[in-house]
Image (tube, rainbow, N blue to C red):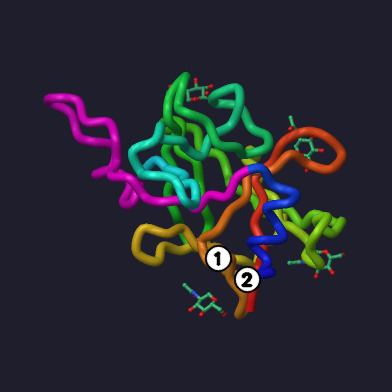
Amino acid sequence: MNLYGRAIILCVLLFWAEIVPAVPTFSGQYSIGSLIPGLSSLQALREGHSRKSAARHLNVRPPNTVGNLTITTGAGGIPLFYIHRGRLWRYINETSIHAVNIINGTEEAPGTNQIPLQLMLEEKPGGIDTGVWKWKGTMLIYQLGRANNSGVYYDCMLPKGGHGLLTFLQG
Ligand SMILES: *[C@@H]1O[C@H](CO)[C@@H](O)[C@H](O)[C@H]1NC(C)=O
Ligand SMILES: *[C@@H]1O[C@H](CO)[C@@H](O)[C@H](O)[C@H]1NC(C)=O
Ligand SMILES: *[C@@H]1O[C@H](CO)[C@@H](O)[C@H](O)[C@H]1NC(C)=O
Ligand SMILES: *[C@@H]1O[C@H](CO)[C@@H](O)[C@H](O)[C@H]1NC(C)=O
């Protein structure tokens, strides 16, 4: 069984993220996407599910806070993200942005021999600082050294309770 097959034992759902064209345009105003290149919401696609099922987005709960990133159906607004100098940022307004940080979990994920990385939204850049976020087509890739996550993310119930968005490096 491959990593994905094993990881599903721990994780309820399997997602990968896709760029969606920048959302807000108000008549008479610039679209935010034209002010910050690449600003977009991040839609999660669940493996094996049709793109027509309810859209789910990378988000935090409650909205506009920091904490564990998760996947929501967009109630309370769909956050916007962009990549700048290899880091992924969440745009709130002209004066406020938050950093998407990759945190090294210290324990193996049950059912795998891998140490998961967790996506956290924090006020300042932190966590592993040598990785790079990039787009490959519509897929959001996290790369660390020569390894990358193939654009695959897992929405997981964590072994010690709580909820988190995990990813694994391969190669
Ligand atoms: C920007 O968002 C932050 C955090 O939500 C808020 O404290 C601040 O008042 C907002 N600033 C503007 C100009 O809307
Ligand atoms: C995460 O931490 C473990 C244990 O300390 C270490 O073996 C591993 O190399 C770390 N992974 C990354 C990507 O830094
Ligand atoms: C957030 O993730 C941590 C593990 O990094 C976990 O201990 C915590 O319970 C999670 N919080 C929530 C609200 O799910
Ligand atoms: C990610 O890693 C795989 C396996 O090493 C490699 O084939 C692929 O080209 C890499 N993708 C990117 C976007 O770097």
Between the residue at mark 1 and the residue at mark 2, the CA separation in whole angstroms equals 6 Å
- How far across and down, in percent of the image, does residue 138 sit? 36, 58
From the image, which quarter does the C terminus lie in? bottom right
Decide which of 18, 10 is in the foreground and name it: 10
* Pointer 1 residue: 132
- How far across and down, in percent of the image, does residue 169 sit? 65, 68
Which residue is located at x 40 percent, y 66 percent?
Answer: 136
Is residue 145 toward the left or the right of residue 17 in the image? right
- Indicate which quadrant contains ligand 3: top right
Decide which of 122, 11 is in the foreground and name it: 11
Decide which of 96, 137 is in the foreground and name it: 137
Q: Amino acid at mark 1?
A: Val
Q: Is the CB of the residue bearing disc 2 within 8 angstroms of ligand 2?
A: yes
Which residue is located at x 64 percent, y 62 percent?
Answer: 4
Residue 30 in the image: above or below residue 77: below
Residue 28 in the image: above or below residue 90: above
Question: Which stretch appears magenta?
Answer: 13-39
Residue 96 in the image: above or below residue 115: above
Q: Residue furthest top?
A: 76
- Secondary structure of the residue carrying tag 1 is strand
